[in-house]
Image (cartoon, coloured by chain):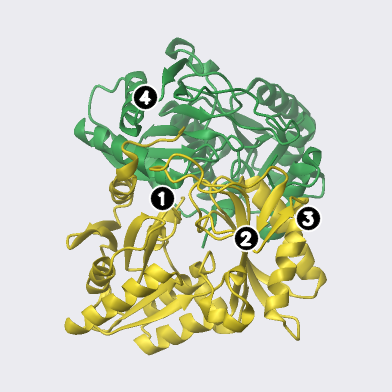
Chain colours: A yellow, B green
Amino acid sequence: MQIFVNNPDFIVEDMLKGFAAAHPEVMLSPLNERVVILKDKKEKVGIITGGGSGHEPAFLGYVGEGMLDAVAIGEIFASPPAQAFLDAMIEADNGQGVACLFGNYAGDNMNVKMAIQMAEDEDIEVKYVVATDDIASSPKETREKRHGIAGGYFMWKVGGAKAASGATLDEVIEVAQKVVDRTRSICVGVRPCTIPAVGTPNFLIDEGTMEFGTGHHGETGIEKKALGTADEIAGEMTEAILTDFDFDENRKLAVMISGLGSTMLMEQYVICGEVLAILKEQGHQVEKVYVGNFVTSLDMGGLSLTIVDLDAEITQLLEADGQATGLKNY
Amino acid sequence: MQIFVNNPDFIVEDMLKGFAAAHPEVMLSPLNERVVILKDKKEKVGIITGGGSGHEPAFLGYVGEGMLDAVAIGEIFASPPAQAFLDAMIEADNGQGVACLFGNYAGDNMNVKMAIQMAEDEDIEVKYVVATDDIASSPKETREKRHGIAGGYFMWKVGGAKAASGATLDEVIEVAQKVVDRTRSICVGVRPCTIPAVGTPNFLIDEGTMEFGTGHHGETGIEKKALGTADEIAGEMTEAILTDFDFDENRKLAVMISGLGSTMLMEQYVICGEVLAILKEQGHQVEKVYVGNFVTSLDMGGLSLTIVDLDAEITQLLEADGQATGLKNY
């Protein structure tokens, strides 16, 4: 395995040590070394998330002012235990309650709900919103069963900015739920990923094919297709999302292309160019564009497309000040 | 080849189209479609660079307010022609001269110098600084022959911030040269890269080995070594740079870990943690840390370590406002 690692069983610990050393704004919680917290605690509703590792910069990279206050970190592709979510809640609480904004996966769902019960005993009020942007993971009729992928970024940014503005817990939950309801993603995989402690790819993608609608943990896509040109793939992804939205008029949109780990930025811009051209041609107005690795799947080859149906409030919150520690590149 | 591409011979064009569509602050120059420019031209010394594609987000991602005004884009791993550098100079000039801050490679050197002669005929004053941070590419005695790699970021940020402050061309050149003189990098490769139009790796790295001191275009390293643990590699990289600096006292430093393309952020933080621990143990004070893909080599596996010997002026300019369009992630 040609990667930079000490003991693969402890790669998450080593990453956390490096992350905390690199970013003085954050630290590992004294309560729990698997919880990353923002040092400067503000008088406001706390915002937390959590999930398995292997999706960097998610989730820890979104700890920052105007974004997340605390994050529970799991092993690779595994939910953090309920105790870690609880410790993140305790760290983030300031007496005004905590919004837990997480992606829809069975383990996270179970552990968050257990942690919320435990938090009640500590007199911490916690409400939650579940990101369900991945349109490939369940049909539209059962939208609540869909997984959360890169679209979670928008929930965190908007929820975080709302909390920073002094909003109540209910107001934060309301706007985070609104963003979730207006966000759709689709993912295409072209090369598998390898869990360091395993050392071999966790699934296979045949040369000349792609997994259309793949998940972020090697979940099979909704369809194995011949690998088309970038323009063809961009067209299929955009159409899948627009069909799911089923807009009856032209909209103001945000577009995110997120690489899955080993996909070149050059490829991401090629896809982005065609997505934007299609949306423009159909009369939509794209107001914000994000290109880069926002939510990854280890070293997987592929990318996700996320489209957000903006309104004035969401746009304003996306543009509000916010520091994503792990994305702070200059 | 499992990547997102239309015709591999036109991947650079397609990337530029997507980049300009994604970032409304920039456009392709009406003079030359291989020159990316900042739309909002300020009354100040112009800052440009240029080089081959395949190093994204360099170079085009560093066009932005307080950074670069124009960038000449070459084919993959190939210098832009002199005419592209000239057109970038014309676009960036505002009557106060242009600083061309580029990385030391034979083709770029030749074409920049030709462009400077051509610019004289247009009454544009151009001075240049050449990044030479890669300590593996030539011995210390012939430091001027070294290549420029991720350390170029610091030259662009500091030079760009100095120009934005209203400095003269000579002042910009002086501070950019100072940063170059105080910056050292070393790169380790663990997996080769593939030029899309070729379709097969341009060199090989045997399983269980690494190229210590590899370049950003598949140049062989100074030594083929057994692939050690992350801590061992971090130690060897840090020692190589500190030996080259040969400090006689403790220093204030900036540290950058730049992934080469397909190296996971998780791995980068593992290496970063150990580098920071070593520097701290040796009594140095690390004031700024950068982790991410700053200058890449297509889909290569590996990373570079860059260390900058800070002074008060450099630190202040690194912290000055500056927008890197292609790094703007939130």
Could you give the CA–CA distance between mark 1 and mark 2, rounded to whole angstroms?
44 Å
- Residue B99: give x, y in percent of width and height: 61, 36
Within 10 angstroms of label 4, few (less than 14), some, or many (20 or more) residues? Answer: many
In the rendered view, would you say A215 is above or below A41? above
Could you give the CA–CA distance between mark 1 and mark 4, rounded to whole angstroms?
24 Å
Q: In the structure shown, which secondary structural element does the residue marked by tag 1 occupy? A: helix
Residue named by callout 1: B319
Please state the chain letter of the residue tagged with numbered disc 2 in the rendered image: A
Residue named by callout 2: A221
Q: How many marks?
A: 4
Q: Amino acid at mark 3?
A: Asp
User: Depth check: A312 or B109 in front?
Assistant: A312
Residue at x 73% of width, y 45% of height: A208
Residue named by callout 4: B241
Q: Which image quarter: residue B45?
A: top right
Q: Amino acid at mark 1?
A: Glu
Residue named by callout 3: A231
Question: Of the residues tagged 3 and 4, which is closer to the observer?
Answer: 3
* Left-right relation of B104 to B232: right
Question: Of the residues tagged 3 and 2, which is closer to the observer?
Answer: 2
